[in-house]
Image (tube, rainbow, N blue to C red):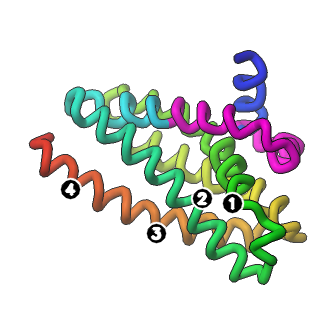
C-alpha cells in the first residue's frame, strides 16, 4: 500500500520517472487498477453524494468505463497520429500510464464541499490530461509534450461527451434527479 500511495503522489507531482517506471514494469498493472478505483470512489462520492447512493454507484461505473475508453482512444489515435507500430506500443502500457495519470482525480472528493464540485472537476481534469500527456510523451517517444497534450485533450473531450451521455441516460433510467 505504501508503494501505491508513493506512486500516486509521484503521479500527482507529474514526475516523469514514475511514468517511465510504469511503462517499463508490467507488474504495476495491479496498482494502476487501484488508482482508478480510488479515482472512481472520489469522483462518485465527491461529485454525486448529494444525489444519493444510486448516483454514487453510477458515478463509479461511468468513471471506470471512461478511463478504459480514454486509454483505448489514446492508444488507437496515438498509433495512427504518430505512425507508431501498434506492435511496439502495448495497449496495457497505455492503460497503466493513463491510470496513474488519473491520480490527481483523488482530489475530486473535495466536490462534497457545497458549490465546489464543478471547479474541482475542471481543475482535476486539466491536471489529469496534463499528467496523461507526460506519460504519453514517453510512450510514443515524442520530443515535445505539445503533441501528446493535443492527443490527450482531444480524446478526453470525446470521452467526456460519452461520459455525459451515459450519466444522463443512467440517471434517467434509475430516476436520479
The numbered disc on residue 91 is 1
Q: Is residue 108 above or below residue 62?
A: above
In the picture of the structure, the residue carrying the numbered disc 4 is 169
Of circles 1 and 2, the one toward us is: 1
Q: Residue at 46%, 53% (x, y): give it.
A: 66
Q: Nearer the viewer, mark 1 or mark 4?
A: 1
Residue 70, quarter of the rendered image: bottom right
C-alpha distance separating marks 1 and 4: 29 Å
Q: Residues within 10 Å of mark 2 (few under 14, many from 20)?
A: many
Q: Residues within 10 Å of mark 4 (few under 14, many from 20)?
A: few
Dot 1 or dot 2, earlier in sequence: 2
x and y, in percent, of residue 5 in the image: 71, 23
Q: Secondary structure at mark 4?
A: helix
In the rendered image, which residue does mark 3 sit on? 158
Say left or right for 67 vs 111.
right
Q: Residue at x 66, y 38 (%)?
A: 32
Q: Could you give the CA–CA distance between mark 3 and mark 1, rounded to whole angstroms?
A: 19 Å
Crowding at dot 1, Cα within 10 Å, few <14 / some 14-19 / many 20+, comes out as some
Q: Quadrant of residue 4?
A: top right
| Distance (Cα) linking label 3 and label 4 | 17 Å
Amino acid at each position: 500500500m505504501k508503494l501505491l500511495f508513493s506512486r500516486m503522489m509521484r503521479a500527482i507531482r507529474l514526475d516523469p520517472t514514475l511514468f517511465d517506471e510504469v511503462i517499463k514494469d508490467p507488474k504495476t498493472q495491479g496498482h494502476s487498477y487501484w488508482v482508478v478505483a480510488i479515482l472512481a470512489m472520489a469522483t462518485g462520492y465527491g461529485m454525486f453524494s448529494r444525489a444519493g447512493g444510486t448516483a454514487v454507484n453510477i458515478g463509479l461505473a461511468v468513471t471506470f468505463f471512461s478511463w478504459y475508453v480514454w486509454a483505448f482512444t489514446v492508444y488507437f489515435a496515438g498509433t495512427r497520429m504518430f505512425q507508431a507500430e501498434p506492435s511496439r506500443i502495448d495497449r496495457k502500457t497505455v492503460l497503466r500510464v493513463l491510470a496513474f495519470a488519473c491520480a490527481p482525480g483523488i482530489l475530486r472528493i473535495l466536490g462534497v464541499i457545497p458549490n465546489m464540485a464543478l471547479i474541482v472537476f475542471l481543475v482535476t481534469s486539466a491536471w489529469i490530461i496534463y499528467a496523461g500527456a507526460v506519460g504519453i510523451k514517453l510512450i510514443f517517444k515524442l520530443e515535445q509534450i505539445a503533441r501528446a497534450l493535443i492527443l490527450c485533450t482531444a480524446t478526453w473531450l470525446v470521452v467526456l461527451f460519452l461520459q455525459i451521455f451515459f450519466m444522463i441516460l443512467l440517471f434517467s433510467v434509475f430516476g436520479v434527479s
